[in-house]
Amino acid sequence: MSLTPDAIAMRLHDLGKALPDTAHPRALFRPWRRSGALLILSGQVNERDGTIIRPGTVGSDMSVEEARGHAETCLLNLLFHVRAACDGQLDRVACLLRLGGFVAAVPGFADAPLVINAASELLIGLYGQDCGAHARTAIAVTGLPGGAPVEIDAMLEILP
């Protein structure tokens, strides 16, 4: 995929999406770690300026559709850290390898993949099928940091 240096940022803008101005870890961890071309990103929740946008549990006080929007917010927070790790250039992503998605939900909730699809769809929309498609886990859990309804982490390969 040949992209101009600002192609991914332009696609984000065209989709009406924006990265946050800041995204600080909620606890004692690094938001990303790089080893050669491998970039591992810590889990990101649906927060802005250190505050969870809307805490909740999917299936009781939040719908799947609302949770999908929060999955996108998690992904935008993740991309904020990708940009930082890649010296401001989102187009240095060579390949999305893995996306992990966690959905705080009621017991027996079986639609975690539908929630996390929102993040996968945005990645494929930004990076295309060849680069953006990824291996993935999408599971329901009983709780996430700060009462967040969704958390997303990732591993990807970056260009030098």
Image: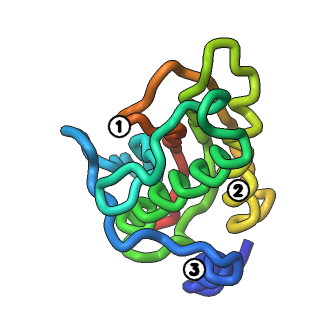
The image shows residue 45, relative to residue 127, as above or below, that is above
* Mark sitting earlier along the chain (3/1): 3
**Disc number placed over residue 132 in the picture, else none:** 2
Contact? badges 2 and 3 (CB < 8 Å): no
The image shows residue 88, relative to residue 57, as above or below, that is below
The residues tagged by marks 2 and 3 sit, at their Cα atoms, a distance apart of 15 Å
Front residue of 45 and 153: 45
Residue sitting at x 60%, y 40%: 98
The percent position of residue 93, horizontal first and vertical second, equals 56, 63
Residue at disc 2, secondary structure:
helix
Task: Please identify the residue farthest to the right as the structure is shown.
Answer: 129
* Residue annotated with mark 1: 146
Asked whether residue 40 appears in the rendered view, the answer is no
The crowd level at tag 1 (other Cα within 10 Å; few <14, some 14-19, many 20+) is some
Q: Quadrant of residue 132?
A: bottom right
The image shows residue 149, relative to residue 106, as above or below, that is below
The crowd level at tag 2 (other Cα within 10 Å; few <14, some 14-19, many 20+) is many
Q: Which amino acid is tagged 1?
A: Gly
Task: From the viewer's perspective, tell me whether residue 26 is left or right of residue 127.
Answer: left
Which quadrant of the figure contains the C terminus?
bottom left
* Mark sitting earlier along the chain (1/2): 2
Asked whether residue 143 appears in the rendered view, the answer is yes
* Residue annotated with mark 3: 9
